Amino acid sequence: MDSWIELLHTALPFLIKGAGFTVFFALIAMVLGLALGFAVALLRIAKVPVLAQIAAVYVSAMRGTPLLVQIFVIYYGLPSVGIEFDPVTAGILALTLNVAAYLSESMRGAIAGVSRNQWLAGYSLGLNWWQTMRHVIAPQALRLAVPSLSNSLISLIKDTSLVSVITVTELMLATKEVIAQTFQPLPLYLAAAAIYWLLSALFERVQRAVEKKLEFAHRH
């Protein structure tokens, strides 16, 4: 046990640095995914059949194939047709495209959950479709979507471990590098699991705080 404590004391700075990159990748992919996911959600509910069908195929493809395969396609497959990305860019791109598909469904469901009367109220005020969406529907849909969006972020934090396969130095790859030097996999993998758990618990607390704030604002 003393050897484990000494090992973890030595390895912890490397693991924390890797965890920092994990959070960075997750937040960047989440922000980009929100923007793309919202656009895809709008296309799914738009009155343009071709665009709605393209968006539906994209969502189905992203949700129906493993994220690991998507990472391989982007990093190892696209160079064969002349499109190359460095590992970090490829990792963020794969995470963004994947999470955007799930976020689009969350936002589409939240938009559908807003009463039809809210649309009619917006139109009665002289707002067009986009203005009604922006000023009336989207704020209400966001409140409904917060739990689902927060869960997606927590899942994304864990999914970042997959980008270690393309040599992106986040928490999992940092752990593997320390293991390669110490030959002590059990305590280090347990430490990495504990860090993922702590990160998830932290964002769960943030989620509950945001939900309470939005609920308070809604009541007042």
Image (tube, helix red, strand yellow):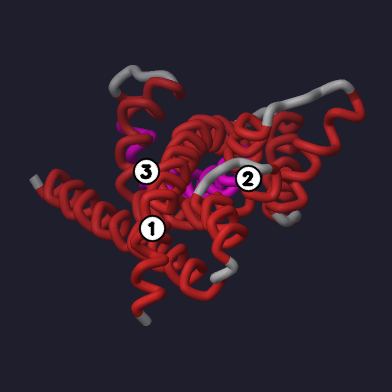
Alpha carbon distance from label 3 to label 1? 47 Å
| Residue identified by numbered label 1 | 10
Quarter of the figure that contains the C terminus: top left
Could you say which is closer to the camera, residue 161 or residue 187?
A: 187
Circle 3/circle 1 CB separation < 8 Å: no
Residue 95, given in percent of the width and then of the height, sits at 60, 42
Residue 150, given in percent of the width and then of the height, sits at 38, 52
116 to the left or right of 214: right
Name the kind of residue labelled 3 in the image.
Answer: Ala
Could you say which is closer to the camera, residue 214 or residue 7?
A: 7
- Give the quadrant of residue 9: bottom left
Compare marks 3 and 2 and give the one earlier in the sequence: 2
| Residue identified by numbered label 3 | 141
| Residue identified by numbered label 2 | 98
Identity of the residue drawn at 76% across and 36% down: 75
Name the kind of residue labelled 2 in the image.
Answer: Asn
Q: Is residue 172 at all visible to an observer of this figure? A: yes
- Give the quadrant of residue 139: top left
Compare marks 1 and 2 and give the one earlier in the sequence: 1
Toward the right, the furthest residue is 80
**Residue 212, disc:** none
Alpha carbon distance from label 3 to label 2? 21 Å
Residue 167, given in percent of the width and then of the height, sits at 66, 43
User: Is residue 65 magenta-colored?
Assistant: no
Mark 2 surroundings: few (<14), some (14-19) or many (≥20) residues within 10 A: many
The residue segment tinted magenta is: 97-121
- Give the quadrant of residue 183: bottom right
Q: Secondary structure at mark 2?
A: helix
Name the kind of residue labelled 1 in the image.
Answer: Thr
